[in-house]
Image (cartoon, rainbow, N blue to C red):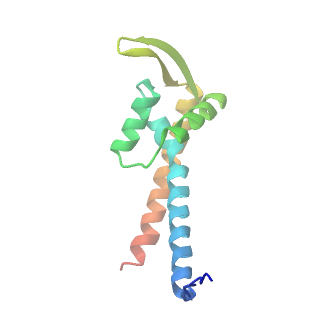
C-alpha cells in the first residue's frame, strides 16, 4: 500500500500578493517611461554624428538606459520609415559592413521640436516634484 503525503501550504498573504502587483506595476511604469524617451535619446545621439546601431546601443547603455538590441532595431526602422533617419552601408575592417544612421533634415527639425518639448516637460516635472519636497 502506497501512502502519499501532501503538504499543506498556507495561502499567500493578501498583502504580499498586492505588494507583488505593485512592484510589477512600478516596473511596467519605469519601462514605459524609458520607452517614452528612447526615441528622443536616439535622435539626440545622432545629432551631428552618424553612428551604427551598436554604437547607439553602447551610448544608451553608458547612460544607464536599460535597452536591448531587440528594442533598438525596430525603433531605428520605425524612425527611418517616418523619414527622420537615413542609413548607408559602410565597409568595416573588423567584420561585416555596418549600417550607419544619420538624421534627415526632417529628423533635425523633429529633434529641435522635441528639445523644446523636453525642456518644457522637465521644467514642469521639476516644479511638481520639487513642490512636494518643500
- Vertical comparison of 104 with 58: above or below: above
Please identify the quadrant where the C terminus is shown.
bottom left
Instruction: Please give the name of the residue rendered at 54% of the width and 85% of the height, measured from the top-left corner.
Output: 7
Q: Where residue 101 appears, x then y in whole percent?
A: 50, 24
Q: Residue at x 43, y 71 (%)?
A: 129
Task: Place residue 12 in its image quadrant.
Answer: bottom right
Q: Position of residue 59 (x, y in %)?
A: 37, 38
Is 8 in front, or is 130? 8
Task: Indicate the position of residue 114 as horizontal and vertical percent values.
Answer: 53, 44
Q: Where is residue 39 drawn, in percent x and y?
A: 53, 42
Q: Residue furthest right?
A: 81
Quarter containing the N terminus: bottom right
In the image, residue 67 sits, relative to residue 129, either above or below, namely above
Q: Residue at x 56, y 31 (%)?
A: 107
As drawn, 57 above or below 16: above
- From the viewer's side, name the closer residue of 133 and 92: 92
Q: How many marks?
A: 0
**Between 127 and 36, which is closer to the camera in this rendering?**
36
Of residue 99 and residue 37, the one placed in the foreground of this image is: 99
Residue furthest to the front = 1
Q: Quarter of the image holding residue 4?
A: bottom right
Q: Is residue 21 left or right of residue 47?
A: right
- Taking the spot 53% from the left edge, 87% from the top edge, the residue there is 15
Amino acid at each position: 500500500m502506497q501512502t502519499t503525503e501532501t503538504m499543506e501550504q498556507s495561502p499567500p498573504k493578501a498583502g504580499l500578493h498586492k505588494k507583488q502587483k505593485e512592484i510589477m506595476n512600478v516596473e511596467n511604469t519605469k519601462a514605459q517611461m524609458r520607452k517614452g524617451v528612447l526615441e528622443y535619446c536616439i535622435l539626440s545621439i545622432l545629432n551631428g554624428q552618424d553612428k551604427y546601431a551598436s554604437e547607439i546601443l553602447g551610448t544608451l547603455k553608458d547612460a544607464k538606459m536599460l535597452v536591448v538590441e531587440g528594442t533598438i532595431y525596430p525603433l531605428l526602422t520605425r524612425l527611418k520609415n517616418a523619414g527622420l533617419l537615413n542609413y548607408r552601408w559602410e565597409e568595416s575592417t573588423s567584420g561585416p559592413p555596418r549600417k550607419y544612421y544619420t538624421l534627415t533634415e526632417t529628423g533635425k527639425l523633429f529633434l529641435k521640436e522635441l528639445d523644446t518639448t523636453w525642456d518644457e516637460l522637465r521644467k514642469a516635472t521639476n516644479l511638481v516634484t520639487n513642490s512636494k519636497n518643500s
